[in-house]
Image (cartoon, rainbow, N blue to C red):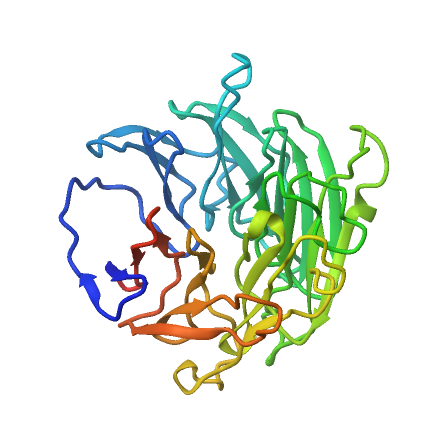
Amino acid sequence: VLARRVFAEEVYFELPAEKWNSKVKPVGEGNAVQISPDGAIVYVTSTDGTLTGLDAGNGDVKFTHTPPQIGDLDITCASGVSIYPGNSSNVNDTAYVAYSVVYERSPSPTSVVVAVSHPDGQQTWVSQELDGVAAGTPQITSDGKYIFLTHNSDFETVGHFTGLIYDTEFVLLSYQDTVNPFAAPAVFHNPAEGYYRDGDDNTNDIFLWAHTHNQLDETVGEGGNFAFQIPVDYVLGGDGLREAIVKLDSRGWQTNSPPAIGNMGRTCFYSVSRNEFRGWIGVEDDTIGKFHKKANADLKSTPNANPDRTLPPLNTPVLSKNESLVFAGRATNVFSAIKVPSSRNETAMEVLWELETTSLVKSPAIVTDDDMYVFVTQSEG
């Protein structure tokens, strides 16, 4: 673990003072250690699908949850957790945590979303089985009613974007793309607008995601990024949801991770192929630079970035709290702080500083609320 001063050149410390430690099942790529919004529970997902809840104050194990077993199928997990904090004004609207697991059916695995109550970890719901392997962490809408995720079938070559109705057996939306598989989605709750063509008046949660690398391709294949919002006038059971999925941009890049979204849903950044970055810097009442247009900010490969590496970085970019910087690991052993262009007239994203690491950074960085420090973990511990 490294902590770095955000606007300085030095590593602040290398060995944080340990407050407590707790043993959990093995944690791998895609799993997460995440604290609940109320600061009470630390949630840990493990490679075998176990979800552990730890007391944030002392590290005691509050609960462990194991997904339902189907026959003798192996269960795997490369998901973090999404947390719905509940509605304090409605006693029947309780907080819950959702994550995805995969049942290793051969040759056609399936995935489910599992939900447990917060903070006691009692299973509240399991979705129906979905084709293929879940990509990352499912995302919950701001009202807790729906859960959206991407998953990839046919040996992870076909992408799916699916919306589920929480606490029911029903699927709200099912969309399939045969061009390439999908990376995991990101969500921005209650945006100022849908920042794309014809999305101006929609303040429903916006979901953004993009194509990821097809393991059958030797080079970077066709890429595209997507947006979805539930339409303003949508009535449950009605039509029009599939048409609300917008393919924004078809370009020669792909990603391995969700984007970082900020600026009331008008700005986003992707880590993309060839160790590069693409961004959309949005402004209110804009008509030319929205998400369906070509990215208006980018960071091209640099000598440190090793342009021969065609695959994208493995971790999600993270915005500083004041949204002036993007933090991300690269496709090589480098962690970067990248300046966000301050105006439309600037298109090049500049590296403020870089930190050479001993292994790849695969997990999102954590920035303190005062923007003073950024914490980074490396894949080899």
* Front-most of residues 286 and 131: 286
Left or right: 328 in relation to 193? left
Q: Is residue 97 above or below residue 27?
A: above
At 55% from the left edge and 18% from the top edge, which residue is drawn?
93
* Front-most of residues 261 and 134: 261
Q: Is residue 19 above or below residue 182?
A: above
Residue furthest top in the image: 91
Is residue 132 among what the camera can see? no
Screen quadrant of the C terminus: bottom left
Residue 286, image x, y percentages:
72, 58
Residue 55, image x, y percentages:
27, 30
At 76% from the left edge and 50% from the top edge, which residue is drawn?
245
Residue 39, image x, y percentages:
33, 32
Screen quadrant of the N terminus: bottom left
Q: Is residue 11 above or below residue 137?
A: below
In terms of image quadrants, where is residue 191? top right
Q: Is residue 364 above or below residue 123?
A: below
Residue 309, image x, y percentages:
48, 81
